[in-house]
Image: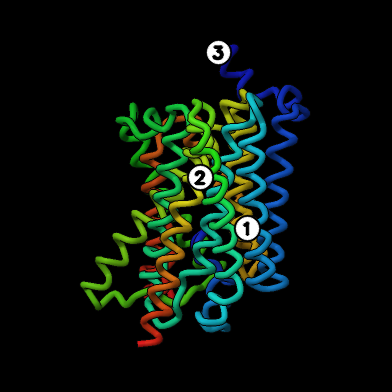
Amino acid sequence: MTVVARAWLQPSEWLLTRSTATIAGYVAALFLAELLLAQDGFLVGGISHVLLLVTLLVHHATSGHAAYRAILLALTLPSLTRLVSLTVTVVDLHQVLWLAMIGLPTLLATLFVLRVLPAGLGVLLGRPSDVPLQIVVALSGILHGVLLYLIVRPAPLVSMTETGTLVVAVLVLVVFVAALEEIIYRGVIQSIAQEITGSRTAAVVIGSVVYACMFVSADSPLVPLTMLAIGGLFGATVAFTKSLWGVTGAHAFMIIGLLIVWPAVLR
Amino acid sequence: MTTSVTDAVADAAQSFTFEFRSTTLGIVVLLALLLLMFAREMLKAYRGRRAVERVRALDIAVWPLYIVFGFIVSVRLLELI
């Protein structure tokens, strides 16, 4: 009980450490790169992400046995995702294909990060101890999807009547959006942040802020704020249940609802 | 609305041709790949445990950027044919 309380309630112990300051600096740089992408265009934003990526790798190579070393590699994943997304998108191809083309190199990078880092994701991907709770968590994604749809109001990604395209789109959204994003932001970044800071609160904050930073280049400022709240909720769920299955299901329901179901049903 | 395809990414794809993006940001990304490949080969020359660990760390960026490079070259070649 004491350990749990300490992990959740002692911000003074992790707020002012060198590791936390380093992580905060890189998260601020990620935020700035995304802001430049939104304000100054793809070239300035892209170059900022290249600089951030190289800086993180050089820092990792030269940081010896620093406690924060592991998270430097994990924080390369958002910049890599953005660089891939800015360079491989071809306007003539369907957006479902964009997601798959961006997802494949990102998945490969994530596997390489997991190869370098100490084991930890295995626990999160293991059999969940409380299956009914995980199902409830997964179903909560339906509400998140409705909420996001009311904010963003996107055009439908695919038509509900084209069965073949619909099946492919759902598969791509589940694998390359829901599962991949949960593994990166909750599985890798949040888990490593918890190991480094020793605080679940800090880990949830770091994971959700990094996740929300990736939405700074959205048209509406409400989007990053909403994703910060959803990321915090998902992060707290993972920290509490020690499983990625529920939040991956929630993310899948959320994104399928947002991009396929609700644009057709609620328009 | 995903972390990979935000409004800014979709706008960039629709506002600028693939040719323009690959000869501007694409070149910058390929220069970064060359730099990382150079560092990787240099590290490979040192065969210690730490060198192996650092090579593996560089693989995180090098292999996805290989795919990006292959994709850009393939699309540009297809445009020529």
The label nearer to you, 1 versus 3, is 1
The label nearer to you, 3 versus 2, is 2
Which of the chains bears the disc numbered 3?
Answer: A
Q: Residue furthest bottom?
A: B81
Mark 1, secondary structure of its residue: helix
Residue A264 has which mark? Answer: none
Q: For the point 67% across and 24% down, which residue is it? A: A9
- Measured as percent of width and height from the top left, residue A92 is found at 40, 83
Q: Are marks 1 and 2 in contact (CB under 8 Å)?
A: no
- Measured as percent of width and height from the top left, residue A198 is found at 61, 23
Q: Are the residues under marks 1 and 2 on the same chain?
A: no
As drawn, is B52 to the left or to the right of A211?
left
Which quarter of the figure has residue A111?
A: top left
Which of the chains bears the disc numbered 1?
Answer: A
Q: Are the residues under marks 3 and 2 on the same chain?
A: no
Query: Would you call the spot at circle 1 few (<14 residues within 10 Å), some (14-19), or many (20 or more)?
Result: many
Mark 3 sits on what residue? A1
